[in-house]
Image (cartoon, rainbow, N blue to C red):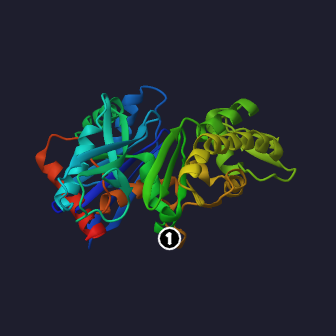
Amino acid sequence: MFNFLKNHKKIIVFDIGSQKIGAICFKISNNRPMIIDMEYQKNNQDENKSHSLSDNIRKIYKKISNNKDKYLIYCNITDPRAIYKKNKSEIRTGKLGISKKDVRKIFQKCVFESKMSGKKLLHSYPLNFIIDNKSITDEPLKKNCENFGITCFNLFVDKNVVNDLNLNFEKNNLSVKNYFDSGVSSSLAFLTEQEKNDGVLNIDIGAKTSKVVAYIDKKIVFAKNLRIAGDDVTSDISQGLQITLDSSERAKIINGTLNPPFNEKIEIDLDSKKKKIINMNVLYGIIKPRYDEILEIIRDNVFDEINTRVGIKSVVLTGGGSKIYGLKVLCENILNRKTRIGQIENNSSFFYCKPEFSTLLGMINLINNQNFLNFFETKSESRLSIYFERLDKWIEESYI
């Protein structure tokens, strides 16, 4: 386990979404995470958004923590303007065999050369090495070459998004150690190693955004945030049935389906405690076109591009928007790939093992996984040394 976790027996991860805010408290035991407690609640931010978010953070932290323990805090970031790009760097080795020090040096160079103005680098992953202009994915150590390079997949978010979140935590005298991208975190909750090796697309349908992350050979090769998701479905229901957004959300969750329903009547609870009776086919006729659109956008603008480059064999659906009945079949029909809903089947009695909590579970995996390479901008030499300790361990486990 990481050295910086030794003096912090308990860790809290926050998932801040547009509809809900959740947190899991866990500790590391025998190099494995052990969940202690979980809390979540509705994230009301209609009025005075900043004040409401800081209040929700305070309420959840108070429920999940105690005054005796010291906690490390991590949080997700969902930035629709996130930038995912590849960066390449090279160094000269003078025909000497590539050493672990060379690998460390080239990765460090790639990380620092990839900085963007106004952006924060959240994650960086090595995709392949380059030896005298020839790309390789196998072991680079001890190979002779004049020029040694690396291609990294980097993920950037707007610094203002980070600053806003920091402000809301600081109002409660809390400090976030590091942030993780929501889409990347979600993809690490339920994907198997076999799926990531063979080629898989993780689609996280949230409230405001749908996050798409693709893996091949156990590496992230593509990621994108789309501004179309569950709230668009809720808005369609509200407009189509002339009911409030809250009533529409309840109708979507309780009665929503993507399979052609029987011709039956259903009751929808209204905010005024009255009920509205409609035909099930009417609700289906509102919901399905929007889910068709979400998956067609992914197919036309994301999936086709990924599939031509890396080959995607399967799809895993996560996020709260993936729980609607019939989405698995619809996704298989539109994307023409084997699809499953992301959840831990043998732990289904635990509600946090469901797809809507994929971001929280993925962050736990990020923190606990010693092989995971990510970099956080900092001026602290100690923090930087911790990062490269992890890089050294990855080199040893992967190539030695």
Q: Quadrant of residue 361?
A: bottom left
**358 relative to 384 in the view: left or right:** right
Residue located at (23% from left, 54% from top): 71
Residue 139 in percent (x, y) is at 31, 65
Position of residue 131 relative to residue 179, above or below, is below
Q: Which residue is mark 1?
A: 347
Q: Secondary structure at mark 1?
A: helix
Q: Which quadrant is home to the N terminus?
A: bottom left
Q: Nearer the viewer, residue 355 or 277?
A: 355
Position of residue 172 relative to residue 366, above or below, is above
Residue 134 in percent (x, y) is at 36, 54
Residue 382 seen by the camera: yes
How many other residues sit within 10 Å of disc 1, few (<14), some (14-19) or many (≥20)?
A: few
Q: Nearer the viewer, residue 185 or 264?
A: 185
Position of residue 368 relative to residue 257, above or below, is below
Residue 315 in percent (x, y) is at 59, 57
**82 relative to 119 in the view: left or right:** right
Q: Quadrant of residue 206?
A: top right
Residue located at (61% from left, 54% from top): 323
